[in-house]
Amino acid sequence: MRNTKHFICMCALALLGEGNVSLLSAQEGEPAITPAEQPKSADGQRGGFLGRGRMGKQALGMVPLLQVDSVKQELRVEGEQAAQLESFTLQVREDFAEEIRQLLQALRSANPEDRKQFRDKVGEIAQRINERLDTVLNKDQSDRLKQIDLQLGLRKNGPAAALTSSDIAMALDLTPEQKKQLRAQARESQGSEPKSLAEVRQDVSEILTPDQQAKLENLLGAEFDLPAALLEKDAGRGQGGRRRIEGRQRRANRRALEPSEQKVEAPEPPAI
């Protein structure tokens, strides 16, 4: 039994990052530190739940959002429900850690043609986890969480990624041509900083019909003040990682400052 618990801990740590050691590595007979007991970062989030790697986070669905204090306050999660949410979070980690670990490992070694299949499986896991949330949240809370999640996706990942997912695309009844236009728009703005929700609305208004824009407004709900940390791009991993980009820029700057290595010919000795 103890070895099984240790195995689950190691799998979950590999997925979610070292910041979760306090939650997952308590020895038998010792109380685990709950998310509420972990120190807060500047944006009010608890110790590192969001983990490392975009795919790992995506596989957890909307659960990471529920570790952000301002989101819990917006949903009015408190008292007994807050305790239920902490238990739910730990249970999700135990139930899905190994499945997600194996999927991400396979994704890393997959060829480009097969990666979409693995990304779809990540989405399926996220959907299963999100459906479980209905056992903890009431309908109003669940609807508002979906609105916040969509706002985050639009601002952080852009309309092409957020709106062309199967459920949102179906709700908006996007045409193949509109999806193509959204992807082209995304390529033009690749590498830019996250936009405000108003800027995103302006961008999609050039592509969506008035009826689709009205549907999108219902899906978004009232604007939520997203913490800046949630909008940061994942650095150092995946296409366009900030660390990788900055590293290339530093190397280019150094090369520009280096003296020319052109060969200097020695002068010929004067004729005698």
Image (cartoon, rainbow, N blue to C red):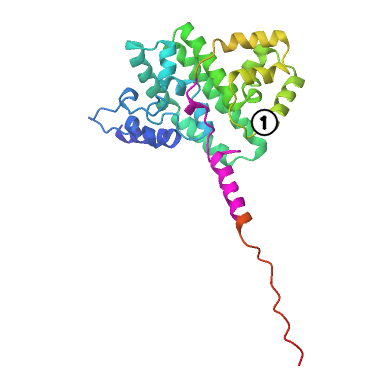
Give the left or right position of residue 30, taking residue 105 as reference. left
Q: Nearer the viewer, residue 262 or 91?
A: 262
User: Mark 1: few, some, or many residues within 10 Å (few <14, many ≥20)?
Assistant: few
Magenta-colored stretch includes residue 60:
no
Q: Residue at x 32, y 34 (%)?
A: 25
Q: Residue at x 55, y 28 (%)?
A: 122
Magenta-colored stretch includes residue 236:
yes
Which residue is at the far bottom? 272
Residue at which label 1 appears: 189
Q: Work out which quarter of the rendered image holds the C terminus and state it.
A: bottom right
Q: Nearer the viewer, residue 6 or 116?
A: 116
Q: Nearer the viewer, residue 40 or 170?
A: 40
Q: Work out which quarter of the rendered image holds the N terminus and state it.
A: top left
Which residue is at the far left? 29
Q: Find the magenta span and give its range.
A: 226-254
Quadrant for residue 48, please give it.
Answer: top left
Residue 118 in the image, given as x and y percentages of width and height: 59, 32
Q: Residue at x 69, y 32 (%)?
A: 187
Total numbered labels? 1
Residue at disc 1, secondary structure: loop
Three-letter code, disc 1: Ser
Quadrant for residue 258, please give it.
Answer: bottom right
Up-down relation of residue 181 to residue 25 (above or below): above
Residue 97 in the image, given as x and y percentages of width and height: 44, 30
Give the left or right position of residue 8, taking residue 37 as reference. right
Up-down relation of residue 249 to residue 151 (above or below): below
Up-down relation of residue 79 to residue 9 (above or below): above
Q: Residue at x 63, y 20 (%)?
A: 200
Residue 249 in the image, given as x and y percentages of width and height: 60, 47
Residue 213 in the image, given as x and y percentages of width and height: 67, 11
